[in-house]
Image (cartoon, helix red, strand yellow):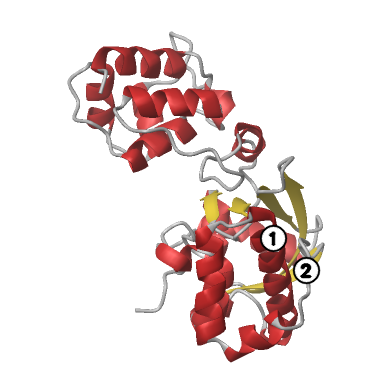
Amino acid sequence: MDRTQLADFLRRRREGLRPTDVGLPVGPRRRAPGLRREEVAALTGMSTDYYARLEQRRGPQPSEQMVAALARGLRLTLDERDHLFRLAGHHAPVRVRRAEHVSPALLRVFDRLQDTPALILSDLADTLVQNRLARALFGDETRHTGPARSAVYRWFTDPDARRCYPERDHAHQSRLQVAALRAAVTAGGADPRAQEIVRRLLAGSAEFREMWSQHEVGKRFDDHKTLVHPELGEIAVDCQALFTENQAQVLLVLTAAPGTEDAEKLRLLSVIGEQQFSPAG
């Protein structure tokens, strides 16, 4: 771990970002350009004291997970991310088509979406980031670990994963999920995680086995869908998908037609938040 160079790199990247670059308001009393330490800490999910110690060359070695969070919060490019890992005393992640590092271009768009649900997914349906309204609508989809990080895996193994869709749409959603997973497995080549998800689902879900045998392939999200919120009921939304160039990540933006009851329900999400939306048990 090169504490001096790590501290310098973090400080310079922090000072090179404007609040608007990460979706934060400028505020009235900002004397210097760049982000404050507490803002970087909030973006990366660490305490302000911990981040400050890193910049002051006296913090403990951050874990690989923490370095990845710093790279994401500071909107680093892949080259900058790899450099950060090495400064922190870790090997840089192997560059593969499927990666946890969210595209900075997608994040710049995502950061500006404050008034409607938005989330970024991998092609295996891992939720990489989601904004406050998406959490209010779906719950915290980033909390899952292991195979359950994939929404496709949860769809066929956890009945609670289907609560966000009306029962009449479950069969249709199952077909979309399996077709998207088939496309992701093909695109990812010998990716062991994708293969493991398929292996587990084939062993544990008769519904999945039947749909997998049909060999449908597709990477399409419904332009229009109906979602179910436990407090607000059904909400009809339009779904816009923005893919990265290699199709490995997608930004989903959910909106409702202005002046409709559905638009009013989305507005109420900001009031309700996640207070009434916690997993059973």
Q: Which residue is mark 2?
A: 217
Tag count: 2
Disc 2 crowd rating (10 Å Cα; few below 14, some 14-19, many 20+) is: some
* Secondary structure of residue under mark 1: helix
Mark 2: amino acid: Val
- Is residue 25 at least partly visible in the picture? no
Give the label on residue 186, or none.
1
User: Which of the marked residues, 1 or 2, is nearer the chain's N terminus?
Assistant: 1
Return the residue nearer the eye: 76 or 11: 76
Q: Which image quarter holds the N terminus?
A: top left
142 lies left or right of 219: left
Residue drawn at (32%, 32%) of the image: 90
In the image, residue 90 above or below residue 15? below
Asked whether the beta carbons under mark 1 and mark 2 sit within 8 Å of each other, the answer is yes
Which x, y percent locates residue 50?
Answer: 24, 31
Residue drawn at (27%, 36%) of the image: 47
